[in-house]
Amino acid sequence: MSESPSASPLTLTQLPLFPLQTVLFPGGWMPLRIFEVRYLDMISRCHKAGAPFGVVCLHEGSEVRRIDPDAPPGGDGFAHEAFFPAGTLARIEQLERPQPGLMVIHCRGLQRFHVTASRQLPHGLWVGDVVLDEPEAVVPVPPDLASTRDALQRLLHNLQEREPEGVNELPLQPPYQWDDSGWVANRWAEFLPAPAELKHRLMTLDNPLLRLELISDLLDKLGVER
């Protein structure tokens, strides 16, 4: 029996990718300063079309394209870049051009995706064919993890009081979903002083309740009072 079209996963081809040394979670709020030519054009096009781009986490190389003095002959001469084959769609919600050659954007994390194929264009931009994950189900925060949610609410309140002018830069932005285990876990993961690889593993977990439980364990190890 063949699946109906509605049951097939949604795929996107030639999605522009932005490899970063951090992780964008669904529902996240990420400010970015764009100054590389390969991204200035891409962001401008996405913003004009109202189209998303993909954020993926680097595990080799840097965010800024660099010349590699030890690169083998016959290549493009740039340092190697490699990223994990899963990421999150990003929608541009604010864009400013404070000076020529610089964009400041704020983007919102949407659905997760898996990269099935990727290639780097001659000017350095990565594009990929991706399969979108199903939107994550809302799982209420259970009573035994309510203190983890409450601690995040207190953290947000303290940050809003301490830096009222910088509220727009915080990863915690409305709409707040305090009774959604996945949302609470994602916002904590963005704050934690953890390696990008660990955050990437948390992002790719399909079970939002398990993600929140792991976050709670990490907070215990870090001595965060709840």
Image (cartoon, rainbow, N blue to C red):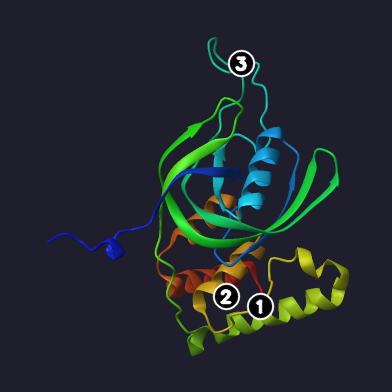
Number of the label disc, if any, that sits on residue 54:
none
Name the image quarter holding residue 39. top right
Vertically, is 82 above or below 135?
above
Instruction: State the residue position of label 1.
Output: 152
Vertically, is 109 above or below 79?
below
| Classed neighbour count for the residue bearing mark 2: other residues with Cα under 10 Å, few (<14), some (14–19), many (≥20) | many
Decide: marks 1, 2 in contact (CB < 8 A)? yes
Q: In percent of the image, x 59 and y 44: which residue is there?
A: 18
**Location of residue 214 in the rendering, given as x and y in whole percent from the top left corner:** 49, 69
Q: Earlier in the sequence, mark 1 or mark 3?
A: 3
Q: Is residue 140 left or right of residue 81?
A: left
What's the residue type where badge 2 is placed? Val
Q: Earlier in the sequence, mark 3 or mark 2?
A: 3
Q: CA distance from mark 1 to mark 3?
A: 46 Å
Considering the image in quadrants, where does the N terminus appear?
Answer: bottom left
Dot 2 falls on a residue whose secondary structure is: helix
| Classed neighbour count for the residue bearing mark 1: other residues with Cα under 10 Å, few (<14), some (14–19), many (≥20) | some
Of 136 and 43, the residue lying toward us: 43
Q: In percent of the image, x 50 and y 78: which residue is there?
A: 181
What's the residue type where badge 3 is placed? Asp
Instruction: State the residue position of label 3.
Output: 70
Instruction: State the residue position of label 2.
Output: 184
Q: In percent of the image, x 68 and y 35: which residue is there?
A: 64
Name the image quarter holding residue 80. top right
